[in-house]
Amino acid sequence: MPPFVALVLSLALIVVLLASERRMNPDVSHALWIPFLWLFFIGTRFPSEWLDMQASAMQRPEEYLEGSPVDQAVFLALYVAALVVLVRRRLPWSGVIAANLSITAFFLYGLVSVVWSDFPWTALKRFVKVLEHIVMVLVVLTEANPAQAMDALVRRFLTTTVLLSVLFLKYYPEFGRAFDNWTGQPFNTGATTDKNALGHICLLGTIFYMSSLLSKAHQEVSRSTKGRMLVDIGLLAAVLWLLEIANAKTALICSIVGMVSVAVLTRTQLGKSPVAVFVGVVSLVGLSAVLDSAFNLREIGIEALDRNPTLTDRTFVWEDVLAMPNNALVGTGFESFWLGPRVEELWQKYWWHPNQAHNGYIETYINLGAIGVALLLIMLTAALFRSLGAMRDGDPFGAVRFSLILAIAIFNYTDATFKALHILFFTFLLVSLLAWPVSESAQTGRENRLDEGPVRV
């Protein structure tokens, strides 16, 4: 098939599927397009990258202090638009804070840590940018029907990114594939800029479509439309194909964990027994630790996945960043470690120029210290318990919430997830945050309007 014909057909299919999704979720306002556009850009390529204004990766540490004016303008416009929506909906911020104490504590500590950063202005700007996650999630959760809004947002994002990724890889390889700047080794990126970003999309897609196909409660969230199951099966197949060619092993493992979790929770009675699920997860973690200690299970598993024991030099980076002078209790300040002399020293040693520790727990430690790690673990634990309670209460997304939180917690071992505009950070907040007083609606999918209802923008 000629590439131009494939382009036209793909775009037509995307339009048809988006129109079908609109019929499935009629209670969703036009405001949902704001978080969709924002999610599309952070999950694929920034606006300047879509316009080909960033021809190459960052080569100088100083570039992390700067940013594209185009990206700044687009994200600021979406940010302001989302804030306007929340103001017009008269969101009770005090209630949101009270309903999400563990998340509030983590973000509040991040703000306070700006004070001791070597680059306080940069740290503050990064903190404000990370708050975009919260604002965009609240736009979704304050819809008249939050369950439909979540379903609509994820469907729109996956439909667009998955089909574009397939199109690029099959017919426009100059956009869907890339070469390592240092080794020249090719890798598949799809609609994103690197294989790990493509893996993030696949992780979300496998868990979401598995739930949509297996969970009757999930299926009842939106109106039934003709051919919905066939569309979900087709897109799940496309996601699995992308996952295979992405060669992103962490995404593969987490996707398997997530799909198995959804299947077990939706097709057995475990979903109605939070205690049994929690005990099972703790037991598996404990057993894995024992086996790893006795038989070096981690190294065996890594080699089975055709990866070297250092996780592509990640373990060396872990040793180096932990050996650098730092305050063990409070860290260097919010997202401040990879700035200045520290990053210059590490870039001189590593040809691939790391800009994160590639371990979210270590990344949190070097930026926010032991206090930050403790708050992160509390936030994860609270989110898991909340998702288990949601399953017990009949939340149609209960299995999705639990499976995504579990998968993201695992993913965070080899990738710094809880930082910057990371799609998995947004996903975590989307399935963990409560927008009081619509939390009941968010958990059950029943329509519950705020005051006079959400504004149709």
Image (tube, rainbow, N blue to C red):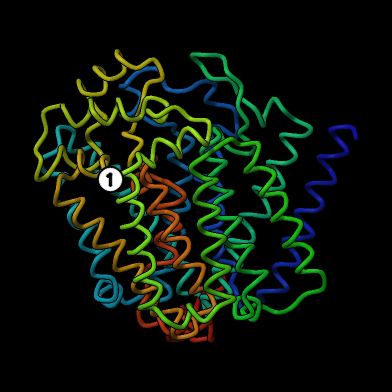
Q: Quadrant of residue 278?
A: bottom left
The image shows residue 341 at horizontal and vertical percentages of 20, 20
Residue at image position (65%, 74%) is: 25
Where is 318 relative to 454, above or below? above
Quadrant of the rendered image containing residue 405 = bottom left
Residue 343 locus on image (x, y percent): 26, 23
Figure label count: 1
Let me know if residue 107 appears in the view. no
- Judging by the rendered image, the residue that carries numbered circle 1 is 361
Q: Position of residue 159 (x, y in %)?
A: 68, 55
**CA neighbours of label 1 inside 10 A, class few (<14), some (14 to 19), many (20+):** many
Q: In this rendering, is residue 406 above or below 175?
A: below
Image quarter hosting the C terminus:
bottom right
Amino acid type, mark 1: Tyr
Closer to the camera in the image, 424 or 3 = 424
241 or 287, nearer to the observer: 287
Residue at 36 percent across and 52 percent down: it is 288
Relative to 108, 265 lies left or right: right
Camera-side residue of 455 and 192 = 192
Q: Is residue 23 above or below residue 246?
A: below
Left or right of 167: which side holds 26? left
Which SS class for mark 1? helix
Locate residue 2: give its quadrant: top right
* Nearest the eye: 409 or 82: 409
Left or right: 428, with 10 as reference point: left
Q: Residue at x 45, y 46 (%)?
A: 75
Mark yes or no: residue 428 visible. yes
Q: Position of residue 292 (x, y in %)?
A: 33, 45
Residue 409 position (above or below residue 401)? above
Is 27 positioned to the left or the right of 307 in the image? right
